[in-house]
Image (cartoon, coloured by chain):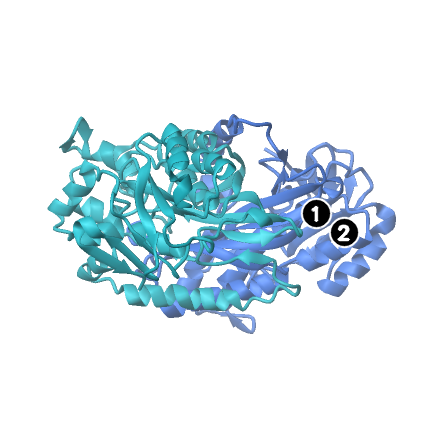
Chain colours: A blue, B cyan
Amino acid sequence: MQLNSPMADNAYARAGVDTDRTGRAIAGLVEVLRTIDPGRPSRSVVGSGHYAAVIALDERTGLALSTDGVGSKVIVAEQLERYDTVGIDCVAMNVNDLVCVGAEPLALLDYIALEDADPDVLRQIAVGLKAGAEQAGVEIPGGEVAQLPELIRGHPSPRGFDLAASAFGVVQLDSLITGERIAPDDAVIGLPSSGLHSNGYTLARRALPDLGEPFGHHTVGDELLVPTVIYVRAALDLIRSCDVRGLAHITGDGLLNLLRLNDQVGFTIDSPLPVPAIFEAIAERAEVSPEDMWLAFNMGCGFCCVVPADQAGTAVALLDGHHPGAARIGTVTAEAGVVELPHAGLSFGRR
Amino acid sequence: MQLNSPMADNAYARAGVDTDRTGRAIAGLVEVLRTIDPGRPSRSVVGSGHYAAVIALDERTGLALSTDGVGSKVIVAEQLERYDTVGIDCVAMNVNDLVCVGAEPLALLDYIALEDADPDVLRQIAVGLKAGAEQAGVEIPGGEVAQLPELIRGHPSPRGFDLAASAFGVVQLDSLITGERIAPDDAVIGLPSSGLHSNGYTLARRALPDLGEPFGHHTVGDELLVPTVIYVRAALDLIRSCDVRGLAHITGDGLLNLLRLNDQVGFTIDSPLPVPAIFEAIAERAEVSPEDMWLAFNMGCGFCCVVPADQAGTAVALLDGHHPGAARIGTVTAEAGVVELPHAGLSFGRR
């Protein structure tokens, strides 16, 4: 159970939000759910806290499950009245999590809660879901549309909607990737992000409130709406070719996500991928420190793969074919629970 | 893809909501999603429109998937500040759908979008989810909590939340229950509901706005918050004992749900289960016609099982052991697409 936190803890604190309380709230929820007795032995192989849960279907086959939403990025879509890309984000947030345990995503169910079921808006959302599904190689055999005008706030009304999904895939239990085999000296390879992806929008929208403002070759609104990259085909291809020891979808907590794989090691990121201009603009306008930026955003790297050092070259060549710009960004260290960015003089630990 | 419609079409129309437009909107979404090309042959065995989607994992095993939410029933929980039962509704809405295809539910992922992550509220929600999961025999190995104050309306703020989930189960493909084997003269057995379950709350809350008003041995608020019955263990037990030809979770469209199983037959419900007092109160206060009531609410019957006539006695005895009050309520007819309630002089067709 992950908190889809709209910004890093320190920025949260400055905004008057008590993240300790939020963390406590979610920990309390998880604690109760862990005590569920289904009346038979639990089939959980990988549980809460990793990117995807895994349930054993039989002795060999695992069913991987994940659920996530687009969060407040949908507000940008509402304000621009362009709804045909957030479906890609919705698929991406789920399948990028699912593939982190080595599972092949098969299907996704969408959940759309909205104020008003406008046919054109729903069709546009579907166009995005379809594009994302085809990029990920999944079907969408069902879903739910809940018209809940009393529950959903619009920007403005009645354009409000929330877009989430759940995704399912299969993984052979003897091929599960959990991160536990990650060892010092392993190579960390980064795959470029397309921008913010689907995290950090509360802070980003506060920093750049004018969506019509020119930004590079387009506008702030265009930039904030760029869809999340889907890494599924690249990750599955890598799994077939290398000894993949860890896969991390880089979301709300930035590079701290690496520690979700294994906190008995550390990570030194000495050659980070180039940081896209949108992050510099946010840091400047909202006066966010480099530390907070790295803890809230993907900073140009949307997905990390950990492989043995001697396979780094093969892995980079393969991944670059899928996502040009993929590169080795760092190395696993023996410093348990620490992520270092030596070029920026930063060092983070999981709180 | 089902619309979680807050009231029947006619009542909708009176409230100024264009249900044709809503139906068109959802049909348009489904139409686009049906054209998804995952780059491999589709594994869908049962698709959109049935209670659960089924994906073939291999030649013998199907993975059943469903997703649904509690809808505006959560507003009653907010107003009463009692959050420990809506989790049961959340599990029920999903697992009761899943078992309709004959699948054994295994796991559920919750999705909670909220204004403010209050530890006590989340713990109470978890208590309900746990109770529901244990009734259904499922685990909850993961989920998502999204703190989205800009997206969620509270009643009052910051109590707002939306509670949904997705559920997964397995079914042997040669034991799938789709309703296609339903034939005239089969028996329809009804299982009692506990009240509104999780449908019709927009209309119910309009009819009975004072949650503190005495109602029977408790209050209107207590009555509106009674959790949805979970029929999983009864349905699975019946599947092991009888030739079950159809299972229908009776939700937003009332007995019209029977036609989701098979619209080449009809259903005569000549002995409906007793109608709980809450439905009479809503009809009276909101001046809803009997026809609209039967099209919006479960009217005392939360789940229907269709078995061959000669197995009706066995089935009723077994089901009554799980849900006292279970009874044969009607018969399958040859009148394609028609549900009749002769005692009330009503006849419905799927629009």
Report if residue A93 is visible in the image.
no
Q: Residue A38 versus residue A44: which sits nearer the camera?
A: A38
**Distance between mark 2 and mark 1 Cα atoms:** 7 Å
Residue at (17% x, 54% y) in the render: B345
Could you say where residue B71 lies in the image, as x and y percent from the top left? 34, 47
- In the rendered image, the quadrant that contains the N terminus of chain B is bottom left
| Label 2 crowd bin: few (<14), some (14–19), many (20+), radius 10 Å | many
Residue at (32% x, 49% y) in the render: B331
Asked whether disc 2 touches disc 1, contact meaning CB atoms under 8 Å apart, the reply is: yes
Q: Tell me which chain the residue with mark 2 is part of.
A: A
Q: Secondary structure at mark 2?
A: helix
**Up-down relation of residue A46 to residue B10 (above or below):** above
Image quadrant where residue A196 sits = bottom right
Q: What residue would you read off at disc 2? A: A239
Q: Name the mark on residue B85.
A: none
Q: Is residue A147 left or right of residue A279?
A: left
Q: Is residue B227 left or right of residue A2?
A: left
Q: Tell me which chain the residue with mark 1 is part of.
A: A
Could you say where residue B166 lies in the image, as x and y percent from the top left? 48, 45
Q: Residue A76 versus residue A319: which sits nearer the camera?
A: A319
Could you say where residue A191 lies in the image, as x and y percent from the top left? 70, 56
**Up-down relation of residue A229 to residue A266 (above or below):** below
| Label 1 crowd bin: few (<14), some (14–19), many (20+), radius 10 Å | many
> Mark 1: which amino acid?
Gly
> Mark 2: which amino acid?
Ile
Q: What residue would you read off at disc 1? A: A102
Residue at (49% x, 49% y) in the render: B177
